[in-house]
């Protein structure tokens, strides 16, 4: 389902930024959407750490096929060996088993997260093994569809900004800050369209 704010965000970004105006027009008809499953979103984000989107999807497909269901209870009962056979590293396998256990026993309660401020939620999520700031940001964009997340450490975002704004050079922190100011309070939307400029098929965590 399209986020309620999407139409307003795209209008405002198009009015402020000619690069985004062109990207928004080019990719009309597709939008950010949420799977709505907090566990799967975080597990997918862990799977996707430091590998390509295509590789991550391949690993995820094998991971899902190896289990009766991708739920915390089922995955918590899995093993490192099973997960490694799906293409996960030993470290990522451990992270996903820990994540599943935390959901299954109630240490993680997603019902609370919808009301938490962005930085407070990031602080809580990064306490989980294997969840750093980038993973927390992906969760807030792809699961909670929060409108103003700016994942400056994301390599895809950096590549897109270099392509469209800095003549192929890695964007300096001051340039990222200025772009963030221009796009606020719709930085998630700007990021999503910049990702589309690299890969027109939307990523779904």
Image: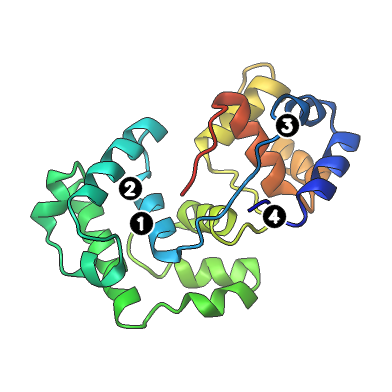
Alpha carbons under labels 2 and 4: distance apart: 25 Å
For image coordinates 64% across by 20% down, the residue present is: 163
Disc 2 or disc 4, which is closer to the eye? 4
Q: Tell me which label, 1 or 4, sits earlier in the chain.
A: 4
User: Looking at this rendering, what residue extends furthest in the bottom direction?
Assistant: 106
Q: Position of residue 158 (x, y in %)?
A: 58, 32
* Helix, strand or loop for disc 2: helix
The disc placed on residue 134 is: none
For image coordinates 19% across by 57% down, the residue present is: 67
Instruction: Name the foreground residue: 35 vs 167.
Output: 35
Q: Tell me which label, 3 or 4, sits earlier in the chain.
A: 4
Tell me whether the residue at label 1 lies in contact with that at label 4, contact meaning CB atoms closer than 8 angstroms. Answer: no
- For label 2, the crowd category at 10 Å Cα-Cα, with few meaning under 14, some 14 to 19 and many 20 or more, is many
Residue bearing the label numbered 1: 43
Instruction: Name the foreground residue: 185 vs 44.
Output: 44
Alpha carbons under labels 3 and 4: distance apart: 15 Å
Residue bearing the label numbered 3: 28
Q: Tell me which label, 2 or 4, sits earlier in the chain.
A: 4
For image coordinates 31% across by 67% down, the residue present is: 99
The answer to whether 46 is drawn above or below residue 56 in the figure is below
Q: Tell me which label, 1 or 3, sits earlier in the chain.
A: 3
User: Is residue 170 visible in this depiction of the protein?
Assistant: no
* Helix, strand or loop for disc 3: loop
For image coordinates 39% across by 64% down, the residue present is: 39
Q: Position of residue 177 (x, y in %)?
A: 73, 43
The answer to whether 73 is drawn above or below residue 201 in the figure is below
Q: Position of residue 36 (x, y in %)?
A: 51, 62
Residue bearing the label numbered 4: 3
Tell me whether the residue at label 1 lies in contact with that at label 2, contact meaning CB atoms closer than 8 angstroms. Answer: yes
Alpha carbons under labels 1 and 3: distance apart: 29 Å
Disc 1 or disc 4, which is closer to the eye? 4
- For label 4, the crowd category at 10 Å Cα-Cα, with few meaning under 14, some 14 to 19 and many 20 or more, is some
């Amino acid at each position: 389902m399209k986020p309620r704010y999407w139409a307003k965000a795209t209008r405002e970004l198009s009015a402020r930024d000619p690069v985004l105006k062109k990207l928004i027009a080019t990719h009309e008809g597709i939008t950010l959407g949420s799977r709505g499953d907090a566990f799967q979103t975080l597990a997918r984000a862990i799977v996707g750490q430091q590998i390509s989107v295509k590789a991550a999807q391949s690993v995820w497909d094998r991971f899902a096929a190896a289990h009766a269901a991708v739920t915390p209870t089922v995955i918590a009962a899995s093993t490192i060996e099973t997960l490694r056979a799906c293409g996960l590293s030993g470290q990522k396998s451990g992270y996903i088993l820990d994540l599943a256990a935390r959901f299954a026993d109630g240490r993680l309660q997603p019902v609370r997260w919808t009301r938490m401020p962005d930085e407070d939620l990031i602080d809580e999520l990064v306490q989980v093994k294997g969840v750093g700031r980038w993973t927390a940001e992906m969760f807030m964009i792809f699961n909670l569809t929060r409108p103003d997340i700016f994942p400056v450490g994301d390599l895809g975002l950096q590549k897109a900004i270099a392509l469209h704004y800095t003549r192929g050079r890695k964007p300096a922190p001051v340039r990222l800050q200025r772009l963030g100011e221009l796009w606020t309070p719709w930085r998630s939307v700007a990021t999503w369209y910049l990702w589309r400029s690299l890969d027109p098929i939307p990523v779904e965590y």
